[in-house]
Amino acid sequence: VQLQASGGGLVQPGGSLRLSCAASGGTFDYFGIGWFRQAPGMEREGVSFISTTSGGTYYANSLKGRFTISIDKDKTMVYLQMNNLTPGDTAVYYCAADRGLILSSMTDQGQYDYWGQGTQVTVSS
């Protein structure tokens, strides 16, 4: 499966964006999907995760309540709804996927075989 991330852009503080991660060459059925981000000069960090098997989700503590991860009914698209954005959310956002990945393992970037190309999110006034 190949991943295509999209939906990034420039937004003012307090604004919202919805990122999309599209699967091509297959579906996300029985996959674990993660969103990661990397700010300039920083290490890549986990943002949000979803198991398409259990439907379970997980969020980085600092992002709970502002970000929501979801998947469409056809399991070909995963979304990351980001609200009340701050300049600290500025980063390149990546989606990643791996078949059979369980929720407790999803924060480990090394567990993912498939990565999208990244989409830039810039929060600035």
Image: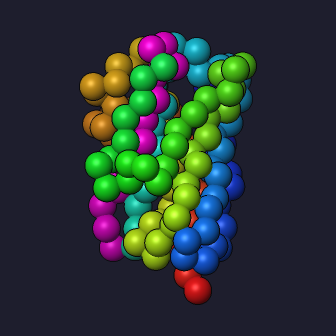
In magenta stretch: residue 51: yes
Quarter of the view holding residue 40: bottom left
Residue 121 in sight here: yes
Q: With respect to residue 89, does 110 lie above or below?
A: above
Residue at (57%, 45%) from the top-left corner?
80
Magenta stretch, residue numbers: 41-54
Query: Along the line of sight, which residue is nearer the eye, 122 or 41?
Result: 122
Q: With respect to residue 87, does 106 lie above or below?
A: above
Where residue 83 sits in the image (x, y, percent)?
A: 55, 58
Query: Along the line of sight, which residue is nearer the eye, 90 or 60?
Result: 60
Residue at (46%, 76%) from the top-left corner?
87
- Relative to 10, is 100 on the left or the right? left
Residue at (64%, 52%) from the top-left corner?
18
Query: Along the line of sight, which residue is nearer the eye, 67 or 7?
Result: 67
Residue 122 in sight here: no
Where residue 42 sits in the image (x, y, percent)?
A: 31, 67
- Relative to 97, is 125 on the left or the right? right
Residue at (52%, 64%) from the top-left corner?
84
Where residue 76 sits in the image (x, y, percent)?
A: 69, 26
Residue sitting farthest toward the bottom = 125
Where residue 48 sits in the image (x, y, percent)?
A: 42, 42
Query: Along the line of sight, which residue is nearer the eye, 75 or 43?
Result: 75
How many numbered discs?
0
Quadrant holding the C terminus: bottom right
In magenta stretch: residue 24: no
Quadrant holding the N terminus: top right
